[in-house]
Image (spheres, rainbow, N blue to C red):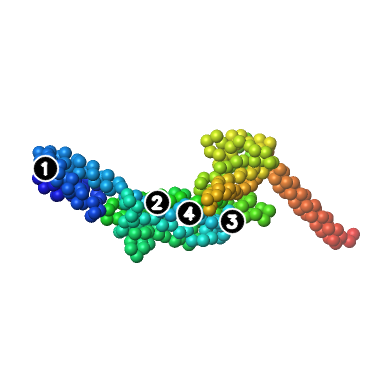
Amino acid sequence: MNVTSDFWGYLEIHTKKRVPKRRKEDIFLMSRRIAIMSPSHGHLIRVLVGSLLLQLCDAIKAKGSLPAIIEVNAAKGHPNPIPTSLQPLKLWCQAIDDQGRPLPLISAQFRSKSNAYPATLSPDKTNASISIEAAQSSEAGKWSCDLHSGYGNITGIIDVFVRPVIKHNGNVRVDEKDGSKFYLEISGHTVTVGDNVTLFCPVYGHPPPVVSWRKGGKIIPASPSNSYALIFPSTTDADEGVYTCVGTNTIHQNGRPKQHSVTIDQHLRIKSKLAWLVPFLIILAILITLAAVIIFCECRRKKQTRELKPQEDD
């Protein structure tokens, strides 16, 4: 039995990973001893060697930068509706063995929820990094660092934080209030009495913001299943007013927790089911007035025509 070929055959078929050269001698020695002790148990040897391989490959770990922060100075962007970072977003990671020694990399990439970015390798190939100018706040969250080395592949996770900001598609009007860049007013809603309407708090952040709702300074309960939504199954006149949602999260900066928040107002207007009648009556009154003026002018013109007509002599 050829222990060496059996060993690498198992590796290629079942693990798809390479073992560090410094580990090969130990594994071959272990395999040879097992083969000498049990020459008739080739399958057992393959299983034991495979287990050793998996343990060795699993010893590869990912090490990366501390949680990063997308720094923004306003809850809304301009001209892009999504706020972007003031400083470049910089991330790095590397693969290490079980003794903490960096391993050379073949390639690497960083992935957010929506995009993938190829990493730049250091001259000695042991460190992967990226630097993103004007990173969008919507890309905050848990990033993946995918490392490909000659010793196996490993993925690490890096948190990218951002304080609560507004997230919308650009079709919503957003205005700053009271000169604050984190106190906003967005387009309201106009509905008819009895309509079903849902108000949403369009905030985003990482960690995910905790949202609370207020009306007239009083706290009101949100939807039990989604605190970002305020549901009105059947609106009444009493539901009209300005509703305020506040999104808050806490980010550790320089070892200390710091709380951030954004406040958003939106106006809910309730109109009567007979609201259409008022403009209809106004239009009708205008048409009646216009008809009366036309009739009056026509009658006056005919009267003047009769008065100017010459009379025949007897």
Callout 3, which amino acid? Ala
The residue indicated by pointer 2 is: 144
Residue 281 at x, y percent in the picture: 72, 43
Q: Disc 1 to disc 2, how far (Cα)?
A: 45 Å
Q: Is mark 1 on a helix, strand or loop?
A: helix
Q: Which of the marked residues, 4 or 3, is nearer the chain's N terminus?
A: 4
Residue identified by numbered label 3: 74
Secondary structure at badge 3 equals: loop
Query: Mark 3 or mark 2: which is in front?
Result: 2
The residue lying at 48 percent from left, 54 percent from top is: 68
Q: Do the residues labelled 4 and 2 touch (CB within 8 Å)?
A: no
Viewer-nearest residue: 243 or 26: 26
Tag 2 or tag 3, which sits nearer the N-term?
3
Write the residue at 67% across / 38% down.
218
Number of other residues with Cα within 10 Å of mark 1, as a class: few under 14, some 14 to 19, many 20 or more: few
* Residue 211 placement (x, y as % from top left): 57, 42
Residue drawn 58% across and 37% down? 222
Q: How far is the residue under mark 4 from the one under mark 3?
A: 18 Å
- Residue 10, horizontal then vertical, whole percent: 19, 46
* Between discs 1 and 4, the one toward the N terminus: 1
Question: Residue 54's x, y, as percent?
Answer: 26, 45
The residue labelled by disc 1 is 36
Label ID, residue 68: 4
